[in-house]
Image (cartoon, grey):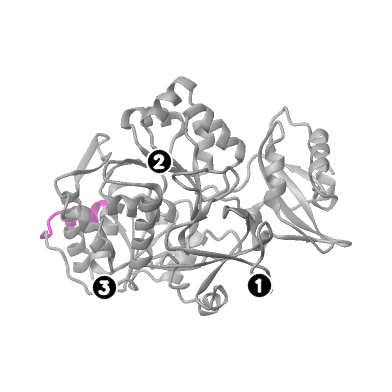
Amino acid sequence: MTARVATLLELYDHSLIDRRDVPAVEYDAADGHTASLTFGELDSRSNRLAQQLGARGLQRGDRLAFYLVNRIEIVDLWIACVKLGVIVVPINVLYKEREIRHIVTDAEPLAVVTTAEQMTQFPAGVACWDVRTLCSDAAGMPDIRPTCALNAESPAALVYTSGTTGASKGAILTHGNFASNARGVAEAWRITSDDRYLAALPLFHVHGLGNGIQTWLAVGCHMKLVARFEAATAADLFESYRPTLFFGVPTMYVRLLDVPDDRARVVGKHARLFVSGSAPLPAQVHDAFHAKYGHMILERYGMTETLMNVSNPYDGERRPGTVGLPMPHVSVRILAEDGTEVGADATGELWVQGPNVCAGYWRRPEATAESFIAGWFRTGDIGRCVPDGYITLEGRRSDLIISGGFNIYPREIEELLLEQPGVREAAIVGVVDRARGEMPVAYLVVDASFDEVAALAHLRTQLASFKIPRGIVRIDSLPRTALGKVQKHLLPPFTPEGARP
């Protein structure tokens, strides 16, 4: 891999040019059959698509959005936009009209690439291009790579935050952000051209797009791209493709625990590395997966605005419940509210600095000024660092519950609840209390074996009294983003009469 690059295309050419005859990707074609492409074919396809996009009026600095489930055309579109200097705006395919309207109004893309069936999701006046027609038209264009003067500071994408609180903001991710992140990921996790990467994460999210696609193109390994992760067919997919590398979210790993032991051992035999991110991975899932597959999942921590920040080590202890140590070329500080650095085992907010950190928020100067201070990015995540350097996340700063002057970090209570028999999912939120300001309340997804009295009794032996939930609300499921992050603001309102204290 090139030691230092200024733009993504310089990074990709290690694969697109130097490995042009090497098989790059297999995927399900429109006719249902498995298709494959070499790196050289990807280069040619993206050249033609770039010519077509240019013919449709796109120029450097313009925005082009896509609203698509995983398909090979997203890869073509991404590389073509990189070559043109066009800024890509991925849109979550689970978003509906109100959420979509916010993004297209804010980013002002020249057009949105989607399917004919999905165009009805978009407000009147938004130009929508059918992905099939666009790529069909591109096939007749000349295979000529466009020339565009770019550098590491050139924007490559506007990726909108998941919007768990309030309206989402567009993080301006540059060529340098994506390139440095890809190099850091490959270095930290020993990813090489010999790997086989199973890509099941959605490409509208930075986990799949920023870590998966960028690292694959950087190292030139083989990739299997699937439309989505499906628990019912997961074992078949792993056995047939035999990946060495898999990136997932906690819900995927929970589903993989349902695979029969004998099949799980076969999957584990061929795999080299399982990585989890985008949401906390419960310690019991770590242990159960290790017992079944023979692999310790590598948990890491990243953000839309920063890509990868912290990771458990490839070589060394992968410690359940922690996100590990700072990534290569990334600096992390843990600061108290007054801006002073906290000591070992003390809790504070994580601040991050490095080439992975975005250039700011699109058209949000106030939000940018609030988040970027003296060259450091305030993550809003609360954590602590033990003496040997491992970092544990305690939750979001906005999730912090202050009860009678005491700080309560929801994740501590959630982890204990998830250890109780019958608890499948848990979320702790703060509700207004006249006497103490706030009190914690538990929202639980449970099965018939759950014993509420026993669970609360156990919590009282493990936690200070002010951390014990004021009530328990049983619900069918926790509202989550596409990547499994709990959207606490969408939980039903707490009513004391509807809960069991």
Which of 123 and 62 lies nearest the eye of the viewer?
A: 62
Q: Is residue 139 above or below residue 421?
A: below
Q: Specify whether residue 335 is painted magenta.
A: no
Where disc 3 sits, the SS reads loop
Q: Is residue 173 left or right of residue 224?
A: right
Residue at mark 1: 340
Vertical placement of 398 versus 282: above or below? below
Q: Residues within 10 Å of mark 1 (few under 14, many from 20)?
A: few
Residue 150 - label: 3
What whole-number distance in Å separates the C-alpha atoms at marks 1 and 2? 39 Å
3 vs 1, front mark: 1
* Residues under numbered marks 1 and 2 in contact, where contact means CB atoms less than 8 Å apart: no
| N-terminal-most mark, 1 or 2 | 2
* Residue under label 2: 246
Q: Quadrant of the C terminus?
A: top right
CA gap between label 3 and label 2 equals 32 Å
Q: Position of residue 362 (x, y in %)?
A: 45, 73
Residues 251 and 128: in front is 251
Is label 1 or label 2 in front?
Answer: 1
The residue positioned 55% from the left and 73% from the top of the image is 371
Residue pushed farthest front?
A: 388
Percent coordinates x, y for residue 81 in the rendering? 27, 63
Point out the stretch of residues depicted in magenta: 132-142
Question: Percent from the top left, x then y, of residue 34?
Answer: 25, 35
Q: Is the N terminus in the top left, top right, bottom left or bottom right quadrant?
A: bottom left
Q: Nearer the viewer, residue 52 or 371?
A: 371
| Residue 142, position as x, y percentages in the image | 10, 60
Please determine whether, in this image, residue 335 is positioned above or below residue 19.
Answer: below
Q: What kind of residue is marked 2?
A: Phe
Q: Earlier in the sequence, mark 3 or mark 1?
A: 3
